[in-house]
Amino acid sequence: MRTTLEIDDQVLSLARERARREGVSLGRAVSDLALQGISHGSRTSKHGIPLFFPPDSRKAHVVTPELIEQYRDGDH
């Protein structure tokens, strides 16, 4: 569907970079970013701990206690 939107410059820049990186249209990148935001909801903390979601959490690495121990002990 075609429409006209006013988009924040930073959002547009992120969407353009994502479109270039993933080889998709700018519209697809904007839609993906919007859907990603919707899927995370508006929750900003859980049990008093702030939540942070990287720009593309589907490609993020899971940090486990074991991984932290490896890095702490210099075994990486």
Image (cartoon, rainbow, N blue to C red):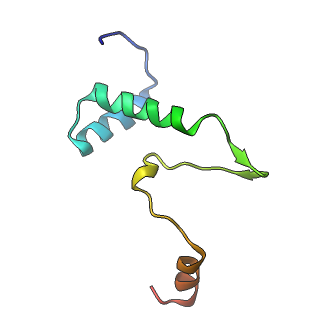
Q: x, y percentage for residue 13?
A: 37, 34
Residue placed most toward the observer, 52 or 38: 38
6 left or right, relative to 28:
right
Q: x, y percentage for residue 49?
A: 74, 54
Q: x, y percentage for residue 34?
A: 45, 29
- Taking the view exactly as shown, the residue that stands out farthest to the top is 3
Locate the N terminus and report the quarter of the image it occupies: top left
Please say if 1 is above or below 69: above
Which quadrant of the view contains residue 22? top left
Residue 10 visible somewhere in the drawing: no
Residue plotted at (53% across, 85% down)? 70
Which quadrant of the view contains residue 61? bottom left
Locate the C terminus and report the quarter of the image it occupies: bottom left
- Taking the view exactly as shown, the residue that stands out farthest to the front is 39
29 left or right, relative to 46:
left
Q: How many marks?
A: 0
Residue plotted at (24% across, 40% down)? 20
Which quadrant of the view contains residue 29? top left
Residue plotted at (23% across, 35% down)? 24
Residue plotted at (53% across, 82% down)? 71
Q: x, y percentage for residue 42?
A: 64, 34
- Taking the view exactly as shown, the residue that stands out farthest to the right is 48
Residue 12 visible somewhere in the drawing: yes
Residue placed most toward the observer, 47 or 51: 47
